[in-house]
Every structure is written in structure tokens, then in C-alpha cells.
């Protein structure tokens, strides 16, 4: 038994940027009533290692140096169907995004209609191409313990109430 949920990875070196990206993404999926889990990363090693243990539907990667470009290529190798959204303060990485077949390229600061539009396109593609990850019941118990939410409330929070398995 488990609950269907989309898993997203957000990588940004700077905490403020990481939290801003996570907040925008989380807000969108909450407003759309789409079950989503966001994992935040502050270093590329942790991000890459996470792909060995988790399946992510999409990764939002802050790209401001060649180490992030390298990480994006490794992610594409581990998870070629994972949607890649590049977030940068510079247009310098746009060509690399094209080579990576990135789903989208966001310029900082990340807010506004462009982001909303991109996330709507992502949802449309996700529904056509990807199945959400099933979170086993025992993981829900751990999440409930960590957040302090009752298990039933957590189930209702991360599901659309039609996909409880």
C-alpha cells in the first residue's frame, strides 16, 4: 500500500535561492492539488548521490558554474527521462541547456507568469509521459513522525484523494 506522489529535486548552492525555488514549485503543486515531494540539495555530490537511491520526476538545478553543468550531465546519464529545469542568473548556460535537452531555462529571480506557465507545461508532460512514484506506507509513517502530522492528515495532504493504494 502506498500513495502516488511526484518527486522533485531542487539544487541551489545558496540557501535563499534554494528556498525561493522550492517555495515557488511547492506553491504551484499545492494550488493545483497535485501530490508533490520536494527534496532540497546544496551540493552537487548530494544531488548526484540522491539519484542512486530515489526516482525523481524532475530536477531543478541552479547552474552558475561548470560543476553544475557536469552534475546535470551525470543526472541525464542516471535518469535520461527526468525533466531538467535549469535555473541561472546568467544566459551563459543556455547552449548547455539546449545540449542537455533541458525542459526549461529559468532566469533568477524565479517568480512570475513564466514560471507558472512552465510548471503547467511540465504537469502536462508528466501526465503524458511519467508515472508518479509510489511512497510505501512505512515511508509515510516516517514522514508523519518527522513533520508531526497525523498519518491520516499527511495522506490527505499529499494525495488527490483518488490515488490512495
Image: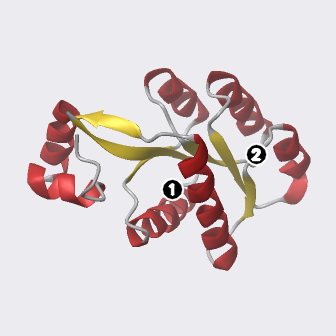
Q: Residue at horizontal 48%, vertical 31%?
A: 55
The quarter of the picture where residue 59 lies is: top right
Q: As drawn, is 155 to the left or to the right of 20?
A: left
Which residue: 64% across, 69% down? 115
Q: Secondary structure at mark 2?
A: loop
Of residues 129 and 102, the one drawn nearer to the viewer in this rendering? 129
Q: Residue at x 44, y 42 (%)?
A: 132
Report the residue at 66% width, 78% height from top.
Answer: 113
| Quadrant including the C terminus | top left
Q: Mark 2 or 1 closer to N-term?
A: 1
Q: What numbered label is drawn on residue 75?
A: none
Which corner quadrant holds the N terminus? Answer: top left
- Residue highlighted by disc 2: 102
Looking at the rendering, which quadrant does residue 81 occupy?
top right
Q: Can you say whether 24 is above or below 140 in the image? A: below
Side (left or right) of 12 relative to 151: right
Identify the secondary structure beneath mark 1: helix
Q: Which mark is residue 15?
A: 1
In space, the residues marked 2 and 1 are separated at their CA atoms by 23 Å
Amino acid at each position: 500500500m502506498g500513495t502516488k506522489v511526484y518527486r522533485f529535486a531542487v539544487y541551489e548552492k545558496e540557501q535563499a535561492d534554494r528556498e525561493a525555488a522550492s517555495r515557488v514549485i511547492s506553491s504551484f503543486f499545492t494550488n493545483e492539488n497535485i501530490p508533490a515531494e520536494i527534496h532540497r540539495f546544496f551540493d552537487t555530490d548530494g544531488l548526484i548521490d540522491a539519484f542512486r537511491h530515489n526516482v525523481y520526476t524532475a530536477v531543478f538545478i541552479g547552474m552558475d558554474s561548470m560543476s553544475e553543468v557536469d552534475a546535470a550531465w551525470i543526472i541525464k546519464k542516471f535518469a535520461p527521462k527526468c525533466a531538467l529545469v535549469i535555473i541561472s542568473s546568467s544566459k551563459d548556460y543556455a547552449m548547455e541547456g539546449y545540449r542537455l535537452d533541458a525542459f526549461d531555462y529559468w532566469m533568477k529571480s524565479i517568480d512570475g507568469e513564466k514560471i507558472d506557465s512552465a510548471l503547467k507545461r511540465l504537469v502536462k508532460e508528466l501526465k503524458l509521459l511519467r508515472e508518479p512514484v509510489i511512497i510505501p506506507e512505512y515511508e509515510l509513517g516516517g514522514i508523519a513522525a518527522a513533520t508531526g502530522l497525523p498519518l491520516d492528515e499527511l495522506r490527505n495532504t499529499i494525495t488527490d484523494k483518488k490515488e490512495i493504494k
